[in-house]
Image: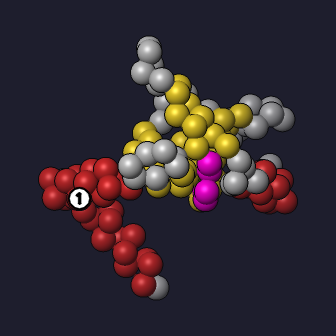
Amino acid sequence: MISGDKARICNKILSCVGKKVSFKYPGSEGVKHGILRDRSVVESANPPGKVPYWDVVDLIEFEKEKESKWLRIGYYRMPGEKLNWGSQTTITEPISIWKRLLVKAAREKSWFRDLLEDVMREMKD
């Protein structure tokens, strides 16, 4: 895949910002409807010759929730010429829960804390 194709695909993935999103909880737990407010996309690292993947971090607004801003991490894949949402299961939580999860993991796991510290160092460069 040439770089122009990669840019075109990233733009297509980003074009979903502002559109409605929904997902169904298992069993009879219900359906959640929101608006995709923002998205970051990066090409995934997978072996050459395999199906290409793109990872996304989404900011979704659920107006009827106590906390309206939620974060979702997912991915797209492109077998052949068709770009597909590949995340049948994602973690989608309010920002406060993400913060609690990340802080707990960083306190408990030095490898995770090292990753976050690396990220913050790169942000300063």
Place residue 6 in its image quadrant.
bottom right
Asked if the magenta segment contains residue 60, the reply would be no
> In the image, which residues are magenta?
35-39
> 99 left or right of 85?
left
Residue 66 placed where, x, y %? Answer: 38, 49
The residue at 44%/15% (across/down) is 28
Residue displayed at 54% across by 42% down: 74
Give the residue number, with chain letter if any, for mark 1. 103
Q: Position of residue 83 (x, y in %)?
A: 76, 37
State how many labels appear: 1
Identified at 48% across, 23% down, the residue is: 30
The secondary element bearing badge 1 is classed as helix
Q: Nearer the viewer, residue 99 or 121?
A: 99
Viewer-nearest residue: 79 or 47: 79
Of residue 17 and residue 48, the one placed in the foreground of this image is 17
The amino acid type of the residue labelled 1 equals Val
Question: Image point 44% across, 78% down: which residue?
Answer: 123
- What is the x, y in percent for residue 108? 15, 53
